[in-house]
Image (cartoon, grey):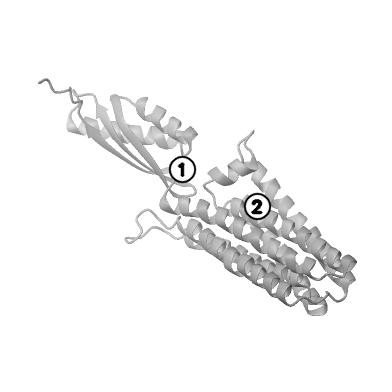
Amino acid sequence: MPVHEGSRRAIFAAFFANLGIAIAKFAGFIITGSAGLAAESVHSLADTANQGLLFLGGTRAARERDDDHPFGHERERFFWAFIVALILFSMGGLFALYEGIQKLRHPHETESMVVALVILGFAIVLEVFSLRTAVKETAHVKPHGQSYWQFIRTAKQPELPTVLLEDVAALLGLVIAFVGVLLGHITHEPRWDAACSVGIGILLIIVAGVLGIEMKSLLLGEVASPENRRALAAALRGSGHVADVIYMHTEHVGPEVILVAAKVIFDPALHADEVSRAIDEAEVKMRAAVPHAKFIFIEPDISRAPSVS
C-alpha cells in the first residue's frame, strides 16, 4: 500500500527544507569554520537523505505480493525507517560528537559571526515550516486527545513519527548551534561553539535511539491497536454459528495490513460445508469492521470439557 498522502506531504516538506538548509549550512561552515555549523551541515544532509529513504520504502512496499512474500512487502516501510535511525545516529549524532570534541581539544574562534547567525536563522525558519507541516498532517490521523509522544509510540505508519522526531531534533539542534555561536562570539571563548556541537550530537543520538527502538518493534511485528482488536473480536463473536472464541492473535505485517489468526468453536451441529460458509461469513464481517485486516485465518475447534479423574 502506498504511503498516505499526508505522510507524503510531510516528507516532501522535510526533504526540500533540509536540502536548502544543508546547502546554506555548508556554505556557512566554509566561510566561518563553526563547529556547530559543521555538525548541523552533516545533520541536515543526513536528514535530506533520510526523506529519500522513506520515499524508497513506500515505493518498494507498494509492490505486489509474490511467492517469496505471500503477505506482501509492507514491512519495507518499517525497514527503511529503521535505516533512517541508523543514519541519524551515525552521520548525525556521532559526527557532531566527534566534531565538537575535536574543537574542544583544538579551539578556534568562529569567523564571520554575522554570516553564521544569518544562516542559522534562515535554517530555523525553514525547519519551522517543515515541522509545522508534519504537525498539521499528524493532526489529521492522530486520535483526538492523544499526545504527540503517544502518537510516536503507538503509530503503525513509520513516516510521520520519523519526520516529527527528525524535525524536532533539527530545530532544537539549530537553536543550540545558534546559542553556541553567539556565546562564543560574546565571550571570545570558542569552546562554547564546540560544547554546543557535543550537545547536538547527544541530542541526535537520543532521538535516533528512540526512533530505532520504535522501528525495531514494528519490524518484529506489533499487535493491532486495542480498538481494532475489540472490533475484530466483536465481529467474530457476532458472526452466525460462532459459539466461542478460544483465542485471537493479531499482528501488523505492514502499516495498513493486519494478519489475524483465531481458533473458534462453531455450533457442533454444523456439517463441514456449513462450517466453511460460517468461516467465510466471519471473515467478511471482520474485514467490514476493520478494513486493514487483509489476512484472516480461522481454525475451527471443538469445546473440550475438563477431564474428570
Snapshot quadrant of residue 299: top left
Q: Residue at x 77, y 63 (%)?
A: 177
Q: Residue at x 60, y 60 (%)?
A: 205
Q: Residue lying at the far left in this picture: please name it.
A: 309
| Label 1 neighbour load within 10 Å: few <14, some 14-19, many 20+ | some
Q: Is residue 20 visible?
A: no
| Location of residue 47 in the rendering, given as x and y in whole percent from the top left corner | 65, 64
Give the mark nearest the N terminus, 2 or 1.
2
For residue 61, side relative to residue 162 (left or right): left
Of badges 2 and 1, nearer the viewer stands 2
Residue 275 position (above or below residue 221): above
Helix, strand or loop under label 2: helix
Residue 36 position (above or below residue 290): below
Q: Residue at x 52, y 51 (%)?
A: 214
For residue 219, side relative to residue 163 (left or right): left
Q: Residue at x 54, y 49 (%)?
A: 157
For residue 144, side relative to residue 73 (left or right): right
CA distance separating discs 2 and 1: 24 Å
| Location of residue 203 in the rendering, given as x and y in whole percent from the top left corner | 66, 58
**Dividing the image into 4 quarters, which one contains the C terminus?**
top left
What residue is shown with label 2?
A: 164
What residue is shown with label 1?
A: 292
**Three-letter amino acid code at the position of disc 1:** His
In the image shown, does 261 or 235 lie closer to the viewer? Answer: 261
Residue 77 position (above or below residue 156): below
| Location of residue 260 in the rendering, given as x and y in whole percent from the top left corner | 36, 41
Helix, strand or loop under label 1: loop
**Three-letter amino acid code at the position of disc 2:** Leu
Q: Residue lying at the far top in this picture: please name it.
A: 308
Residue 144 position (above or below residue 34): above
In the image shown, does 244 or 153 lie closer to the viewer? Answer: 153
Snapshot quadrant of residue 240: top left
